[in-house]
Image (cartoon, rainbow, N blue to C red):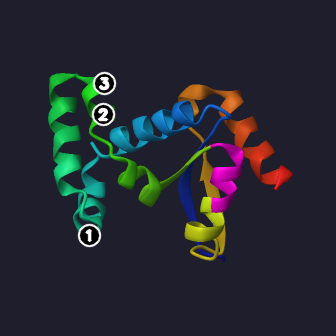
């Protein structure tokens, strides 16, 4: 079977909204213990610690604010359709035999359609 991997993919004509949604996903995932080694290897320990500390206080806004642009660009695809397609080609194409693009579920069908549209148009 092919090697597959999930990549958070948040697409919107509103670049800031797309990146904010990706940051929310990264923040939530950073609270899960299994990601600690990934953050350590990637150099995001301080950010992950700030996210977990905000989580412990129930401060969702601080969690998202602790996610840096560097984290978004390293961990996810987020931005306008053109930006996401370009970044995929630069960063993710060929990393997996099958890349599974994972839209922010809290944005519903709109997020799914945005990813499909971005990659079917390019």
Left/right placement of residue 6 relative to residue 40 reads: right
Q: Left or right? Give the position of 49 relative to 72.
A: left
Q: CA distance from mark 3 to mark 1?
A: 25 Å
Q: Which residue is mark 3?
A: 61
Q: Residue 48 placed where, x, y %?
A: 23, 48
Vertical placement of 93 versus 87: above or below? below
Q: In the rendered structure, does residue 81 fall within the stretch colored magenta?
A: yes
Residue at image mark 2: 65
Give the secondary structure at mark 2.
Answer: helix
User: 36 or 22, which is in the foreground?
Assistant: 22
Spatial CA distance of label 2 from label 3 is 6 Å
Any mark on residue 41, and which?
Answer: 1
Query: For residue 51, what is the image quadrant?
Result: top left
Is residue 4 on the magenta stretch?
no
Tag 2 and tag 3, C-beta contact below 8 Å: yes
Q: Are marks 3 and 1 in contact (CB under 8 Å)?
A: no
Q: Is residue 15 above or below residue 71?
A: above
Residue 9 in the image, given as x and y percentages of width and height: 58, 48
**Label 2 Cα neighbours within 10 Å, binned few <14 / some 14-19 / many ≥20:** some
* Mark 3 or 1, nearer chain start: 1
The secondary element bearing badge 3 is classed as helix
Q: Quadrant of residue 96?
A: bottom right
Q: Position of residue 45 (x, y in %)?
A: 19, 56
Q: Which residues are magenta?
A: 80-86
Left or right: residue 14 versus residue 37 is right
Measured as percent of width and height from the top left, residue 65 is found at 30, 33
Q: SS at mark 1?
A: helix
Q: Which mark is residue 115?
A: none
* Quarter occupied by residue 70: bottom left
Question: Which SS does the magenta portion mostly show?
Answer: helix
Q: Residue at x 27, y 60 (%)?
A: 39
């Amino acid at each position: 079977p092919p090697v597959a991997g999930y990549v958070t993919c948040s697409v919107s004509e509103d670049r800031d909204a797309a990146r904010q949604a990706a940051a929310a996903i990264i923040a939530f995932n950073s609270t899960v213990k299994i990601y600690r080694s990934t953050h350590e290897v990637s150099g995001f320990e301080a950010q992950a610690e700030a996210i977990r500390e905000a989580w412990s206080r129930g401060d969702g806004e601080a969690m998202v604010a602790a996610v840096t642009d560097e984290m978004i660009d390293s961990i996810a695809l987020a931005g306008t359709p053109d930006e996401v397609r370009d970044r995929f080609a630069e960063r993710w194409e060929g990393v997996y035999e099958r890349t599974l693009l994972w839209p922010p579920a809290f944005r519903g069908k709109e997020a799914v359609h945005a990813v499909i549209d971005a990659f079917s148009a390019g």
